[in-house]
Amino acid sequence: MPYSNFASMPCTLSRPAALLGERWTLLLLRQIFLGTRRFEDFQATMDISRSVLTDRLNVLLQENVLKRVPYSEDGRTRHEYRLTEKGRDLYPVLMALRTWGEKWMAPDEEESFHLHHRDCGGGVRAKVECTGCGAELSARDVEVTARQ
């Protein structure tokens, strides 16, 4: 199946995969969550070509994950990229990938930065929980049923 068909599948996992599955997109979102906002800064921190960066930013703008916000520099109006509510809601997705990556793909000494809760200093991790009772869940705790 062609990659472009994922976006039209009636599946709540295939549509996000179509948006986030391109290899630069998650890294671009990582940089945005780390505070990068300007085109030149993305290029410098990611070693990404201008054309690929432009394309990825345009897709995220079209999907309302990002918005362009004007700012002035040297008397010129320029734009920076900010997360929308839809974009901010991707934070747990990135944290889940990071949590998995830390456990299975990177020894502790390879971490380039640590994430800590501002208030208490504790570490950060993603978790899946029940909306009814708040219990933390694994795949074995979840039953899948057809929609009625």
Image (cartoon, rainbow, N blue to C red):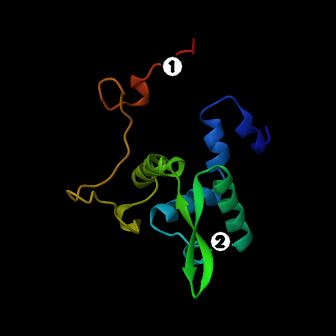
- The x, y position of residue 29, in whole percent, is 54, 59
Query: Which amino acid, mark 2?
Result: Ile
Residue drawn at the location 39% of the way across and 36% of the way down: 128
Label 1 Cα neighbours within 10 Å, binned few <14 / some 14-19 / many ≥20: few
Which residue position holds label 2?
Answer: 48
Quadrant position of residue 70? bottom right
Residue drawn at the location 50% of the way across and 61% of the way down: 30
Residue 25 makes an appearance in the image: yes
Label 1 to label 2: alpha-carbon separation: 40 Å
Q: Which mark is residue 63?
A: none
- Using the image as rendered, state which of residue 24 and residue 32 is in the foreground: 32
- Using the image as rendered, state which of residue 17 and residue 99 is in the foreground: 17
Marks 1 and 2 in Cβ contact (< 8 Å): no
Rendered view: 118 above or below 40: above
Q: Is residue 124 left or right of residue 29?
A: left
- Using the image as rendered, state which of residue 127 and residue 85 is in the foreground: 85
Rendered view: 91 above or below 69: above
Query: Which amino acid, mark 1?
Result: Val
- The x, y position of residue 41, in whole percent, is 56, 76
Q: Earlier in the sequence, mark 1 or mark 2?
A: 2
Residue 41 makes an appearance in the image: no
Number of marks drawn: 2
- The x, y position of residue 44, in whole percent, is 58, 78
Rendered view: 38 above or below 1: below
**Dot 2: element:** loop
Say which quadrant the C terminus sits in: top right
Residue drawn at the location 41% of the way across and 67% of the way down: 110
Q: Is residue 10 left or right of residue 124?
A: right
Which residue position holds label 1?
Answer: 144
